[in-house]
Image: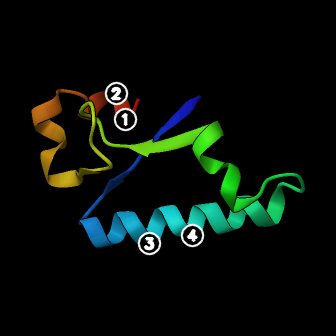
């Protein structure tokens, strides 16, 4: 399973961004359907068992430079 990290300003942004990305994937990948998402990938934050991370918290993860290098 692939994991995609979502970094946003708020929970609402995470919901909007992931739903938009899923719509684009379904539109562009012929064989992919909404019901299949749970089997191929999941959205997550930088910390284990989170659905997204906020930009304001990036420094506390010690990965800010990794994201931009």
Q: In this figure, which residue is indicated by the disc labeled 3?
A: 16
Q: In this figure, which residue is indicated by the disc labeled 4?
A: 20
Q: Quadrant of residue 39?
A: top right
Q: Is residue 20 left or right of residue 15?
A: right
Residue 47 appears at what percent x and percent y?
24, 33
Earlier in the chain: of badge 4 and badge 1, it is 4
Quadrant of the image for the N terminus? top right
> Does the CB distance between marks 1 and 2 fall below 8 Å?
yes
Q: In this figure, which residue is indicated by the disc labeled 2?
A: 66
Q: Secondary structure at mark 4?
A: helix
Tell me what residue is drawn at x 22 percent, y 52 percent. Answer: 55
Earlier in the chain: of badge 2 and badge 3, it is 3
Q: Is residue 17 above or below residue 5?
A: below
> Does the CB distance between marks 4 and 2 fall below 8 Å?
no
Earlier in the chain: of badge 4 and badge 2, it is 4
Q: Which mark is residue 67?
A: 1
Q: Is residue 19 left or right of residue 28?
A: left
> Does the CB distance between marks 4 and 3 fall below 8 Å?
yes
Q: Is residue 67 left or right of residue 35?
A: left
Q: Secondary structure at mark 2?
A: helix
Residue 11 appears at what percent x and percent y?
26, 65
């Amino acid at each position: 399973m692939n994991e995609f990290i979502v970094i946003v300003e708020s929970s609402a942004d995470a919901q909007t961004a992931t739903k938009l990305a899923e719509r684009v994937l379904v539109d562009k990948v012929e064989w992919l359907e909404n019901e299949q998402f749970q089997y191929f990938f999941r959205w997550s934050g930088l910390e284990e068992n989170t659905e997204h991370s906020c930009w304001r918290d990036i420094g506390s993860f010690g990965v800010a430079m990794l994201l931009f290098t």
